[in-house]
Image: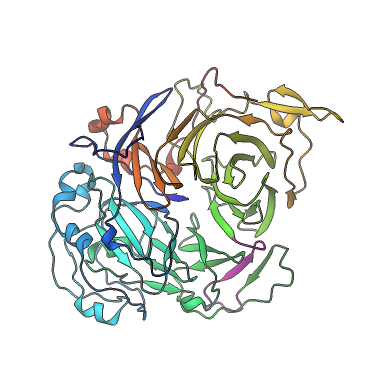
Amino acid sequence: MINTANGMISTPSSSVNAQSSGLKTYFKTPEGRYKLHYEKTHPSSLLHYAHGKTVTQVTLAHLKDKPAPSTPTGSSSSFSASTGVKSAAARWLGSGNGSRALSFVGGNGGSKSISSTSRIGSLGASSSSNSLTNTNFDGKGTYLISNVGDAIFISDLNSQDKDPIKSIHFSNSNPVCHAFDQDAKEGHDLLIGMNSGDVYSVSLRQQLQDVGKKLVGAQHYNKDGSINNSRCTSITWVPGGDGAFVVAHADGNMYVYEKNKDAAGDSSFSVIKDQTQFSVSHARYSKSNPIARWHICQGSINSIAFSFDGAYLATVGRDGYLRVFDYSKEQLMCGGKSYYGAVLCCAWSMDGKYILTGGEDDLVQVWSMEDRKVVAWGEGHNSWVSGVAFDSYWSSPNADGTGETVMYRFGSVGQDTQLLLWDLEMDEIVVPLRRCTGGSPTYSTGSQSSHWDNLSPLGTLLPASSIRDVPKISPLVAHRVHNEPLSGMIFTQDSVLTVCQEGHIKIWMRPGVAENQSSNTETLLNTSPKDKPSLSSKISGPSYKQ
């Protein structure tokens, strides 16, 4: 499960380091070879598992130009962590990382100098007077944020250095999820959800400027589980929400916060009358934070995702259901059950027409918002599907010029250690025409909408579909990319990133990127996925299996 903001990768100045035995360093697609560019990992000496192991997630964060200087405003907290400046921080003080990055990203902070200026709003009273800061570091660049054990690691995506440039350790719980707001105009842009239920918001740039190993300038929400003491499972900013964010928990509840309000604002909500029904409760006071509680389901919410325009929110959970909500109306729109078991991950297409889900049935489900039902099952994984994503940067070689997306490329990763790439073209899949009593369904090629049953009413959760009733698609590519089970993936303009549960990240460069990298410009770097035109493409003769 990976969250993403836009980013690009520098061209390597040396060959890729020796790779794990038995794994190929490339995989083939119709467009050409994806090649393993380099890897990101973490020194074992920095890991601590006092609070148990957690599954690594990765967030891609692009920091733009440094804003005008201002005094940090984060509230202080009693949270404490190790104050030592260890190897990751020491590496960050050097100039090696930035020297290999492309010049248009400012070297991700090359030319670093250190002063002993004190910080305001540090999480520990002792660190606020002793913390060293890097005042000349503007933070501009692209970074990978990952959680492993009790730490958050920040790596420079534009450097071939395997080790992180910054580590932040937590003494009371493990970080388990995080999200970055690349459109934040000021203030905090990074959210961190904890295994204890606590939530922090911080400025990523401020963390990079500080050389210590604890959070600085943080807002602390749901402190000590005062609102909800169950594990955070997923966290995300509300697109265009002016600092609003949503946190999902393992008890089936989801909370809406506003970063511009006091983190310690008193909130109390009405008692949930029926645990099996969706309900929304608003805080009683205007200064409360969180401002609302959404009770989604019984059991854990495993992942949440907003459509790119922020209109709809998708949730998937332990009970096996995908649910889609109209966020502003706080209304359940539609949803459906998996073929088997829990659903672990979900992702939206750029145009908001389709949702991908993956889970314990080893299938990738394609859900249509237009038809409000599953329109395809992807068969190819041999174990649980742990991460899915649409490739918003991919376009097929034959564009029809209509401006409408007619084919989608998406990817999935699973606990079978495989990365699968898929092509979805709705006009080419074989869809059920009708179901004959006592026999197999008949099929027809073409628009599924004209052949399938009428739309289910708004707010309906559909039961699991019969395996005979849903069209099947096969992967375009299946490649074993890690030795350990995978936990997520990211598509960027230049690459595909994969991450395993143990926190090792691989960057696979797209075909032709290494040769053409030198011609890229800063304009491309600053183009976010939502600014990208919709894909208008079609590949002739895709191979789909029934």
Q: Is residue 111 above or below residue 18?
A: below
Percent position of residue 35, x then y: 33, 32
Q: Residue at x 76, y 32 (%)?
A: 452
The magenta span reads 283-300
Q: Position of residue 382 (x, y in %)?
A: 55, 39
The residue at 14%/73% (across/down) is 116
Query: In the rendering, at what x and y percent does residue 171 appear?
Result: 36, 73
What residue is rendered at 45% in x and 50% in y? 2
- Is 369 magenta? The answer is no
Residue 207 horizontal side relative to residue 334, left or right: left
* Residue in the foreground of this view, choosing between 99 and 42: 42
Image quadrant holding the C terminus, namely top right
Q: Can residue 353 be seen in the rendering of this structure?
A: no
Residue 284 within the magenta-colored segment of the rendering: yes
Frontmost residue, 150 versus 7: 150
Q: Residue furthest right?
A: 437
Residue 491 shows in the view: yes
Q: Is residue 352 above or below residue 52?
A: above
Q: Residue 186 vs residue 476: left or right?
A: left
Count of labels shown?
0
Give the percent coordinates (x, y) of residue 270. 67, 76
